[in-house]
Amino acid sequence: MNHWKLLSGLLGIIILISGCSKEKTSPAETSQAASESATSKDAEMNTGNEFQLAIQSEPYGTTTDGQEITQYLLSNEKGMSVNIINYGAIVTALYLPDRTGKSENITLGFNSLAEYEKKGPYFGAICGRYANRIAEGKFSLDGKEYQLAQNIPPSHLHGGEKGFDKKVWAAESFSEKNEVGVRLSYVSPDGEEGYPGKLTLRVVYSLNNDNELKIDYTATSDQATPINVTNHCYWNLAGTGNILDHELVLNCDRYLPVSDIAIPTGELAAVKETPMDFTSAHKIGERIAQVEGGYDHCWVINSAENQPAFCARVKDPQSGRIMEISTTEPGVQFYTGNFLDGTEASGGYDKHGGFCLETQHFPNSPNQPEFPNTILKPGKVYQQTTIHKFSVE
Ligand code: BGC
């Protein structure tokens, strides 16, 4: 991230205005570009502030099969900005000022579309049709057995060989008085990756002046299908280094113990007196050594009956940056970037260089009927909302 800051300081504004940037664009640049680009039909301007609630778009790159990808730049009056592309519905960057006003990208990502197209750690992407694991990639529905890709053998992970994170989505931006955003949609054909039914999915990212990044998910299907869609951002509120000193609170009294291949045993175990207990603030690194391989588990959110419930609060004491998450989902996968290894495939990020809080249903639910239902039936609407609220202390 440091290398990007340096680069962006020298080149960013010129590159953005010329419209050929594949690199990440920071809020100061976005704001300046917004003021200079009076012709942008997307931009909504507020006056009297260095920063504005605005949305802009720019070409991001071309996929290997020749499809043009666009990057949307959402920014607000607080100097926060979010970059989103319509490949994988990926959040490529999120800039947030720290307590001294210094802005940094606090989400992990690659610098080019070509890197996102390769097999990777799902940086910033929307994962589906079924995020997380399905044991042996198998499930039965209405008496029929389905076999999905076992892309993390012997399990199915994040939708298979080419999940929603590797698709080109249709996109349109919107600008309203109190929020700006982008509506992304993807139609997953019947049989794609082995899943039954044509699924029509819409994901709406929106940003307001309260520093809330909201993600709304809506889907329908013409046949019964499992569905579990999540955003897979890796966060590092310091913008650099590792996340072991970040302080985490999870509004979760229980978590799902797993087998040695990360399939839930079915038990909803109490976190009390275990290293999984984040009901009060603990540094992520405090007890991580007691958890084999690091944290990569689903917690059960103390729920609020379909209203977005408070799920998590994370603070980086150095920068003062805070992220609070609320969601309609019953679970959250807390993953501490255990498989990041500093290589190109990891975007150069080291182990624990970021953490994920993936709001979702429980892993392997299609095979664990005692878990909350993940089967979407025709005529029904799948609807979930997750809100990330950012602040500084
Ligand atoms: C999973 C990890 C997996 C990672 C892939 C997370 O959602 O829980 O086990 O390695 O995604 O990057």
Image (tube, rainbow, N blue to C red):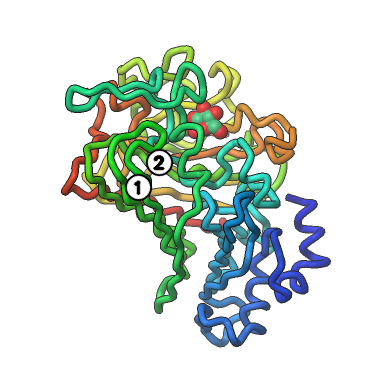
Q: Amino acid at mark 1?
A: Thr
The image shows residue 97 at horizontal and vertical percentages of: 63, 61
Query: Within 10 angstroms of label 1, few (less than 14), some, or many (20 or more) residues?
Result: many
Occupied quadrant, residue 377 = top left
> Disc 1 versus disc 2: distance between alpha carbons?
7 Å
Extreme top residue here? 260
Q: Is residue 326 above or below residue 291?
A: below
Extreme front residue here? 65
Residue 373 visible in this rendered orientation of the protein: yes
Q: Amino acid at mark 2?
A: Thr
Going 38% across and 35% down the picture, which residue do you hit? 130
Q: Is residue 39 above or below residue 53?
A: below
**Residue 327 badge:** 1
The image shows residue 72 at horizontal and vertical percentages of: 55, 65
Going 59% across and 36% down the picture, which residue do you hit? 121
Q: Secondary structure at mark 1?
A: strand
Q: Is residue 276 above or below residue 14?
A: above
Residue 320 visible in this rendered orientation of the protein: no
Q: Is residue 274 above or below residue 4?
A: above
The image shows residue 356 at horizontal and vertical percentages of: 52, 39
Name the residue carrying label 2: 359
Q: Secondary structure at mark 2?
A: strand
* Discs 1, 2 touching: Cβ within 8 Å: yes
